Image (cartoon, grey):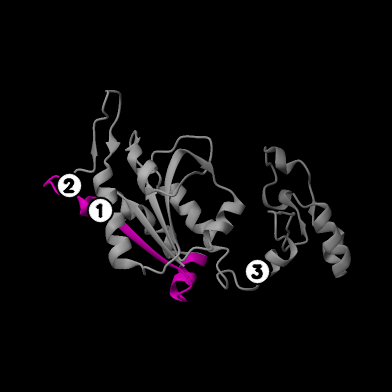
Amino acid sequence: MRFHILTIFPNIFECYFKESILKRAKEKGLIDIKIYNLRDFTKDKHKSVDDKPYGGGPGMVLMVEPIFKAIKKIESEVISKKSKKSIILMSAKGKSFNQKIAEKFSKFDDLILICGRYEGVDERVAKYIADEEISIGDYILTGGEIPAIVVVDAVSRFVPNVLGNIYSLEQKRFPDKITSYPVYTRPSVFKPKEIWENCPLRFCRKRIWKVPEVLLSGDHKKIEKWREKHSR
């Protein structure tokens, strides 16, 4: 699966995509992530990508022309004509992103993500270019770069072999919902007072923190029932 991200701040993505699961997925050729600087698709010497809004008002608006040119290049030079693709505008007024949408996006060969900035994006991008507008929550961010990272991360988890056996286990057990049960690791008994005798914090009041006995029992049927009971 290939992700194409349009942004005016390409360096934002460099660190996140070079670590952990996404890094390994890229190295194995399971996913590909390409970053496009919208300033490369401008025609003036200042590489302007934004301008004042018609009708007045605060802030600046990303122009339609650089975005259109970037999409044209991607569709004509980068991806195959037979590719199943979708163009997504990261937008505060978009549909709320969730697990079902992530799974739907994973069915595409190419996903093009447009990152907004400033006061917003020229509405003609949403009206004529994008297939969908997506928001990651009811709050305001400085741009669409963080939402694009969220989408890439969530969608990549559905790509076969990105998570290896974990992917298969999650999908077989809980195909239609997100679940989360409490998890523990060593030590089975932790005594915070041994490390911090005069700990003033609330979480230090309980002197001994134990792992639930059922998880130490080795009885996998009981463990499975416990996890289902405590799943959210």
Residue 165 sits in quarter = bottom right
Q: Magenta span covers which residues?
A: 21-47
Circle 1: residue type: Lys
| 180 relative to 32 in the view: left or right | right
> What residue is shown with label 1?
69
Q: Position of residue 118 (x, y in %)?
A: 33, 36
How far apart are labels 1 and 2 at the CA level? Answer: 13 Å
Residue 23 lies in the magenta-colored region:
yes
> What residue is shown with label 2?
47
- Reading the chain from its start, which is encountered first: label 1 or label 3? 1
Q: Position of residue 181 (x, y in %)?
A: 74, 54
49 relative to 81, above or below: above
Quick one: SS at disc 1? helix
Quick one: SS at disc 2? loop
Nearer the observer, 211 or 226:
226
Nearer the camera: disc 1 or disc 2: 1
Q: Position of residue 103 (x, y in %)?
A: 58, 58
> What residue is shown with label 3?
166
Quick one: SS at disc 3? helix
Circle 3: residue type: Ile
Residue positioned 61% across, 53% down in the render: 100
Q: Position of residue 191 (x, y in %)?
A: 75, 53
Residue 121 seen in this snapshot: no
Circle 2: residue type: Lys
- Reading the chain from its start, which is encountered first: label 1 or label 2? 2
Residue 93 lies in the magenta-colored region:
no
Residue 52 seen in this snapshot: yes
How far apart are labels 2 and 3 at the CA level? Answer: 45 Å
